Image (cartoon, rainbow, N blue to C red):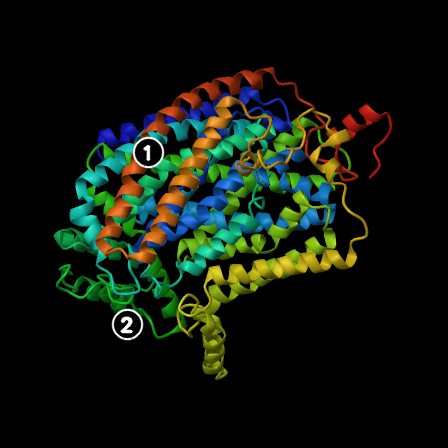
Amino acid sequence: MHLIDWIITIVPISIILFLAVYSKKYVRGVVDFLAAGRVAGRYVISAGDLTSGLSVITLVALVESKYQVGYALTFWEYLEVPVVIIMGLTGYCVYRFRETRSLSIGQFLEMRYNRPLRIVASTIRTLSEMITNAIGPAVAANFFIYFLGLPHKVMIFGTNLPTFGLIVGASLCLCMVVIWPAGRISLLISDAFQGLMCYPIFVVLAGYILLHFGWHDTIGPVMMDRANGESFINPFDIEKLRDFNIFALFVTIMGKVMNRASWIGNDTTNSGRTPHEQKMAGILGTWRNLYAALMMLMVAVMIIALMTHQKFADQSHEIRQELIQKVSLEAVPDDALREQLNDKLSAIPVQSHEIGVDAPFSQDVNIDTPYMDTALETLGGTPEGNQQYQKFRTLYHQMMLPVALKNILPVGLMGLFCLLMIMLLISTDDSRVFNASSTIVQDIIIPFFKKPLAPKQHLLLLRLTSTGVCLFFFVVSIFFVQIDYIIMFTVIMTALWLGGAGPIMIFGLYSRFGNSVGAFGALIFGSGFSAVGLYLQRNWAETVYPWLVSNGWDASVGHFLETVSSPFHPYVVWEMDAVKFPINSYELYFMAMISGIAAYVIGSALTQRKPYNLDRLLHRGEYDVSNEYKEPFQWSLRSFYKKLIGITPEYTIGDRIIAWSVFGYAIVYKFGFCFVGVLIWNAISPWSVEWWSNYFFITSLVVTAILGIISTFWFLIGGIIDIRKLFRDLAARIDDPLDNGMVEGHVSLVDKKAFEARTHKPQDD
């Protein structure tokens, strides 16, 4: 990179690290370190959640998947809109969890069920979360190696060290610089600052890509040039797409409803100054994410156009040649075999494809097919070779993004993009390390203590555990081998927890029905199903498939899989394959969720003796020790529309405007006009592929850009005001040492003290 690019990158990062260290002065107790004192405002939470939710791995995974299936499925993703918006407007799960005043998800589990479930469930969740998130530093390290053109090994003090390990270690050290001083306070402040800086970067990057490539002369024609049934832009012509298809979308929607509460508790969902403020932060997320979505969309379609369009043939050929040389160094350990592979791949001529003259591309036959066929022919044929081919193919598609950007971004934009990626790396990794470490301390270690730790001891334990989690991330990143799409790996890995977590959390928050027997059943069957699926996926090419062949079972198992999946063709297709496990992660996740729900309901129905005291859990009625609970919403025909979008007596005029604006944009415009209206129109008179190209250009680019510019200024002003207020409130807050996450008799220590003070006698369990 140019010196200007380094200055653009280093100066803002230095400011972010300074803010993280400076925030240490506001930590007085455990609640400050874990939940920012529960005094954060909506804009701080919302802006911080933007960067902690995005990441390098998120962008790489999106480009990887969209490069395979395009954007036709985006139209059907509008089905998510009413589900997500109504959950956000009503505060589904988030509002009730904040009412429990739990410092962690495990504290909630002990109050609602029992201590053994708290420990077991938290262990499963933490392992699932840590292994899933540990590949983040690995993907990010590879990204920077390819983006900056770094060698795979560097000589330091006479020792040849892997660049990959050095970058992973450096990124995790940056995480500790942010986490160690003030925990959630430093995370929230630094993430909010990064979020506010991200908005103008999104605008500049999206604008450059659109002006440099153009939609109608480059991007649109490439997206339209696809075989029947595999369209990149016509949502009514995608029945042959595999992996990322309609069924995957259905599972995604189901998972969002079932597992809305499954990850909350150790993130910002317990940092709001009131449940209402927490809810409003979620509602603002609709506007917050507009430009982030636009930027990622533009990057993804840019890669498709650059690597496919005829006018970029020479440039894309050079990018591919650079890419395969670096990928082969990682994927193929044998020097002779790697040299043979590189020679064959280098001999492939420039691939030129003329739109409208040559046959349209498909998933099986496209501009990358000669490279993949050559790699499979050279590497495949043995279990070890098949696994090497999987790694080569995976890295080839994942690292195409950084190599392409390295070759096309000018001075200045190179620095801005590098800054963006480093900010996303820091904000995501520190949040995930902190979430895992706080879960370990609060829900696995602390429950074994009979007496509360002194605040200083508690804080030291949290900091040391964060260091331990960083070391775990480092080890997993160094030794982990990625052999599938990032999204697919994330789905099956998180399903170890999410397979059984949904009914545990939903029934726990909303129903007096359900007990620890049902909860354990959900974990055993839901999470257990996912664990079996994960094992088969990870060991298929090298162990499982060869074992089937050696026993002569491959044909019979293949016939069984095809027979079972045949009623669901073409969306679910299970065919025997020597390289990849026939059942994908979304299908395994779906079956795990069904198993978890059934186990919870059956187990609870057979063993529950009396309803659970839900009012005590939610601090309602006589248990409202903080005077936060508002009277229940009174149902009537006149007030139904208010209830639909979550308007309650707490809403100010400004809150109502925000809620109605989100409802109008998401439900009326996106779902009603852009989806339902267009769906009806196409049912009467189907659009041509050119019309679909114009549709995505207007709805996804033009409208989003206009609204994104407005939200950029809006969140910048609101974020600055909220950050100043956060500092003032933290300085004025009085800490209660009993508010540390410990539970006694299904009640937190701080609540038990308050209940006893109010009633002058111990509260019955």
Determine the residue positioned at 48% across, 37% down. 430
Determine the residue positioned at 40% across, 26% down. 715
Residue 164 visible (yes or no): no
Q: Residue furthest right?
A: 761
Q: Secondary structure at mark 2?
A: helix
* Mark 2 crowd level (few <14, some 14–19, many ≥20, 10 Å Cα): some
Q: Residue furthest bottom?
A: 552
x and y, in percent, of residue 36 in the image = 57, 27
- Check residue 360 in the rendering and tell me which mark sits there, or answer none: none
Amino acid carrying mark 1 in the image: Leu
Q: Mark 1 to mark 2: distance in Å?
A: 40 Å
Front residue of this view, candidates 35 and 140: 35
Vertical placement of 633 versus 582: above or below?
above
Instruction: State how many labels appear.
Output: 2
x and y, in percent, of residue 529 in the image = 58, 63
Amino acid carrying mark 2 in the image: Glu
Asked which quadrant contains residue 39, the reply is top right
Left or right of 462 in this view: 665: left
Left or right of 8 in this view: 564: right
Mark 2 sits on what residue? 377
Vertical placement of 286 versus 69: above or below?
above
* Mark 1 crowd level (few <14, some 14–19, many ≥20, 10 Å Cα): many
Determine the residue positioned at 40% across, 48% down. 78
Vertical placement of 396 versus 561: above or below?
above
Q: Secondary structure at mark 1?
A: helix
Front residue of this view, candidates 401 and 523: 523
Front residue of this view, candidates 31 and 640: 640
Determine the residue positioned at 53% across, 60% down. 590
x and y, in percent, of residue 465 in the image = 59, 39
Mark 1 sits on what residue? 419
Vertical placement of 172 versus 178: above or below?
below
Residue 592 visible (yes or no): yes
